[in-house]
Amino acid sequence: MKFLYLLLLLSTLTASAGQVFFKMSGASVKNPLLWAGFVLYGFSAFLWIYALKFLPLSKVYPFTFLTFALVLILSGIVFGERLSPLNYLGVALIVIGVYLTVQ
């Protein structure tokens, strides 16, 4: 069971990385980062569907919100975007909410 949750975390990480690559590519079809983003996003979807095969949707879906939180953090790290204390509070609430939901 823990293995499936680890797959969901990996799905979250790859979806988030895909979003960052989309931004880095400048939406240029010729940029390999755009295609890397598609590959990561596709891999994320594959992991997601695999987890859905064994876990209830009510346990799997909250992991979607972790993607939002991770993209927010990555935007600060990778692109130097300024994050406010409220952003960090929001991330903490998302993490706590997902944890409580999957219990």
Image: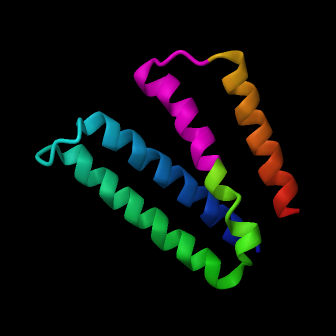
Q: Residue drawn 58% across and 43% down? A: 68
Total marks drawn? 0
The answer to whether 96 is drawn above or below residue 62 in the figure is above
Q: Magenta: predominant secondary structure element? A: helix
Residue interval drawn in magenta: 66-83
The answer to whether 102 is drawn above or below residue 67 in the figure is below
Along the horizontal axis of the image, is 21 left or right of 35? right
Pick out the residue farthest to the left: 30
- Can you give x and y, in whole percent of width and height, for residue 5 in the image? 70, 65
- Can you give x and y, in whole percent of width and height, for residue 44 in the image? 47, 63
Protein image colouring: rainbow
Q: Is residue 89 magenta?
A: no
The answer to whether 81 is drawn above or below residue 71 in the figure is above
Q: Residue drawn 11% across and 46% down? A: 30
Along the horizontal axis of the image, is 79 left or right of 22? right
Q: Is residue 2 visible?
A: no
- Residue 55: name its quadrant: bottom right
Q: Is residue 56 visible?
A: yes
Question: Which image quadrant: the C terminus?
Answer: bottom right
Question: Which image quadrant: the N terminus?
Answer: bottom right
Q: Nearer the viewer, residue 28 or 40?
A: 28
Along the horizontal axis of the image, is 1 left or right of 13? right
Q: Residue drawn 81% across and 48% down? A: 97
Q: Is residue 74 magenta?
A: yes
Q: Residue drawn 56% across and 70% down? A: 48
- Can you give x and y, in whole percent of width and height, for residue 18 in the image? 40, 49
